[in-house]
Image (cartoon, rainbow, N blue to C red):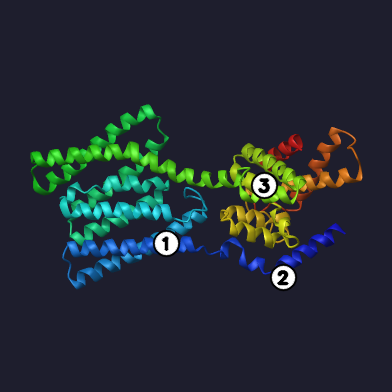
Amino acid sequence: MKRNSQEEKKKKTEDAGLKKVYTREERIYPKRVAALLLFVAATIFFMTVNAYRGMLATGGFICEALLIVPACLVTVLLMIHQRKEKRLWYQDTDYLAFVLIYTIANAILTVAGFFLPDFLLPVAVCTFLIASCGNETLTIASSLLMTVSVSFGSRYDGSVYGLFFSEVIIAVGLAELIIKALKKDRAVLFLVVTAVQCVLPLSVRYFTKLAISKNDLYFSLGLSIITGVVSVTVYPALYRRLHLERSYRYETILDDDYSLINEIKLFSDDEYERARKLSVVSLKAAREIGADAALAAAGGLYYRVGLLRGDQEIEHAVQIAGEHGFPDQLISILYEYQGLIRKPTSKESAIVHMTDAVMRRLDAISKQSDKMESGWNRQMLIYSALNELSTGGFYDDSSITMNQFLKIRDVLAKEL
């Protein structure tokens, strides 16, 4: 009877068209599209400004466009790929923060080109700003895109290209060291950045002019100090801000005063208590295996939120999540509710599913009998329920290893 009920629910949700509309592969977010378009527009705009500054003829501008535009589009594809591979600061980002930083860095470099000689452009400063996204590949790609646009439009020679390339690679390499370093060690890294940034431009200056003036020395030293300050103060602050952005989103929706939680309380005190228990246990299990604890906690808390609007829980849950602007990964967990439409595709979704399945099994037995025979029987029941799901291949798409599965099972046996 229970199996038939689940099949009926599955058919209803499939009839509602959810499988087509809400799969992760087909979801399109206007904010992400707008941010990517802004990235392309900013790149083309600064390319045009650089071409104007370099007084390129029409043919030169077309050649620059043929170089920059394809590289820009490839960078956009790289951004999308890095997000899907979970290599950005967090997977649900709308790219806007990164695009704004990229635009600011481009503006700094382009404006500086009007006043400073080529060897003194603050390429390293701009690279450190972009590096706050926390992705080396994307930082290198976008920084080189920016510097090539400036260099080509201004018709710089090959030695300047080499200087810019070296500054980008060195800045990206030092960026990771700065983020991981203790505060007391950042003073040493400040000296390293300052020394490198002072020596590199002077070397190129001597290579091209076979002489170094006092002004060259003073300006290079000033730029190196500015670069050092940015690297150990501004860059870490931006990095923390981007990573905290994700935490703020989960802290908000997990707060007990959040509007949707109040709706759950008004709907049913029992449902609220169950949701909180599911959330806490999921969080502990996620921490045990190093998964995303905040995501698992939110998934557990809102796993049955569709009940607020009656039947077709999955459809209603996804609608509610969309109305509240929930992160994409969280919406995926709600879409994978009980595995009716799609089996869990992430570790966090698998954790929430396991916890909910065990709680439902225990609730069903408690209704049949006022008490369990013993704690040992409860543990065996939990082991049996989870082993049955695991051997049935329910978590094959979640990337959970057998060792992690056993750890989760032990946490559930202890907490439930």
Q: Secondary structure at mark 2?
A: helix
**Does residue 34 appear anywhere in the picture?**
yes
Q: Which label number is shown at residue 15?
A: 2
In the visual, does 38 lie left or right of 359?
Answer: left
Of badges 2 and 3, the one in the foreground is 3
* Residue at numbered disc 3: 301
Amino acid at the residue labelled 2: Asp
Q: Secondary structure at mark 1?
A: helix
Point out which mark residue 396 bears.
none
Q: Nearer the viewer, residue 399 or 61?
A: 61
> Dot 3: what SS?
helix
**Up/down of 293 relative to 394, above or below:** above
Please identify the residue farthest to the top as the structure is shown: 184
User: Residue 227 at what x, y percent from top left?
Assistant: 27, 40
- Dot 3: within a 10 Å radius of its alpha carbon, few (fewer than 14), some, or many (20 or more) residues? many
Q: Amino acid at mark 3?
A: Leu
Q: CA distance from mark 2 to mark 1?
A: 34 Å
